[in-house]
Image: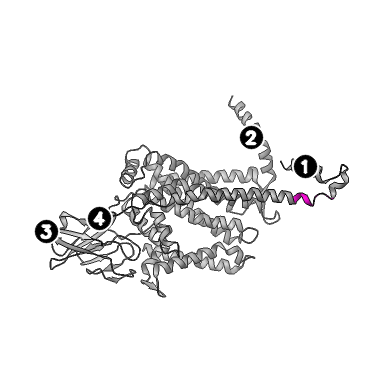
Amino acid sequence: MAQGIGHWAKTRLGWEQLREELARSVAPESSPTPYLLAGAVTAFALQVVTGSLLLLHYSPSAEQAHRSVGRIVGTVPFGGLTRGIHLHSGNLLLALLVLLVVVIVARRAYVPPRELIWVTAVLAVPLGATLAFTGALLPWSQDAYLNARVGSRMVSYVPLLGDALQEFLRGGLDVTSATLHRAFAFHVAILPPVLAVVLGVHVLALRAVPRPPTDVGMIPVYPDLVVRLAATVVAVFMAVLTLAVLVEPALGPAAEPTAPILAEQRPAWYLLVPHELLRVAPPFLLGVPSPKFIGGALSAVCLTILGVPLIDRHGSRVTLGLFTVALLVGALLTAHALL
Amino acid sequence: MSDSVDDSERNSVGSPSGAAVGAAPAPQPRRRDILNLGIVGAAGALGAVASYPALVLMAPARRDSPHAVVDEHISKMPTGSGTTVMMGDRPVIVLRLADGSYRAFLALCTHLDCVVQFSPERQRIECPCHDGLFDLEGNNISGPPPRPLREFAVAVRDGRVEITDE
């Protein structure tokens, strides 16, 4: 019976043709890119599933948000585990996206005609970070409230559009329940499809520009690569599940602007580089308010990174060197912020 | 669709014999280009028209925030203490100095809008986000804040303390 249904579906979906096609295509054996992508897609799928489940219990208003997350963690069966998987897979997704960019640089896989592979990989990083940031605002804890204040104020330093952007993101002049609601809309409805499209275009671009078959040791996509990718999916799932069982993410006190803040406030790991720069900078740099200066400098760096395939058309060693230096500086600043 | 265009093209331009097919291709792409341009243009115009209401809708609603606060417990504050009250959605830090007078400031750091608070031990105003420090006059004395805190007027009438943002 089950076999009959399987056969029925396979013939109608063109399963055999797909399998034959994949068996004819080959992929470089040594490239880590397919595994990173499989990991990222797994993490993203976990986000969609657990996020949808959390959505059934979450209430996106300043009055209710913190209590509803408290209920999810405290009384909803498997609620804490689901939230744990959601948070850990979000962090993992962002880490894998960063790693994907690093791998592309190391393999010099950004030179034309691979511009789209590069641009989509680079764009996925801030998208993943914004998803993580807006998600962290949703419990509307004291941390979340301060992060919302600082994050939206940082945007106000964007030239020309700054004030309008800040008001747009806050949903008004001040950080209020409307701010939480906008973060909610971005987190659950607007950004996930955008990230999905960016990752989809990345995969299409990867397929369109394969490496020359003589390049390295090649393996058939089916069954060799498919089996390895399946193993990657299982490994990522198990890793996230284990992490979620062992480490339950904290839920700080509810947002209360008049309550005393006891500890020094530190943002999430992916924001420690700008945080540390903002903390140690004097009020003005070259006569410009330091947040504006730092924001401008970091934006310039990001735009330059986005334009790497235009600047370095042949995979120069200088690019690799500059990236290594940038990663080291980032790691040092992160370590300094943590110590 | 494209096949039927080709056929009509051939019928109108070409001769009954197959010999003209070789000469015909020149006008064919042209007509198709114009059609494509029309389709893309129409889609673009539709998108532009549709995006206007969407953009207008996204703008946040303007709300009037209160510009004054009267709080019972401010009147009972001991000297040398500080507290934070809300003026609508904005936190306000209220200090009662040693001489019994009041000072009130917008409790938002001039650096990046973090909520500042009064430290009774160190008798100063501190920002927990980027280590900015202000004195009891609201002046920025250390760290990244570029300006003093914004001050509000405080009036004491019949034992009631009223803070206003004019």
Determine crowd level at label 2: few under 14, some 14-19, many 20+ residues with C-alpha closer than 10 A: few
Based on the picture, tell me whether residue B27 belongs to the magenta stretch.
yes
Query: Circle 4 — which element?
Result: strand
The chain containing the residue under callout 1 comes to B
The answer to whether any part of residue A334 appears in the image is no
Q: Quadrant of residue B149?
A: bottom left
Q: Confirm whether circles 2 and 4 share one chain.
A: no
Q: Residue furthest bottom?
A: A286
Q: Nearer the viewer, mark 2 or mark 4?
A: 4
Q: How many marks?
A: 4
Q: Quadrant of residue B151?
A: bottom left
Identity of the residue drawn at 78% across and 45% down: B9
**Sequence-wise first label, 4 or 3:** 4
Numbered tag placed on residue A13 in the rendering: 2
Numbered tag placed on residue B159 in the rendering: 3
Colouring method of the image: one colour
CA gap, disc 4 and disc 3 = 20 Å
Give the amino acid at mark 2. Answer: Leu
Query: Circle 3 — which element?
Result: loop
The C terminus of chain A - image quarter = bottom left
Which residue occupies the foreground of this view, A296 or B153?
B153
The chain containing the residue under callout 2 comes to A
The chain containing the residue under callout 3 comes to B
Q: Position of residue A303 (x, y in %)?
A: 53, 64
Residue stretch rendered in magenta on the structure: B23-29
Q: Confirm whether circles 4 and 3 share one chain.
A: yes
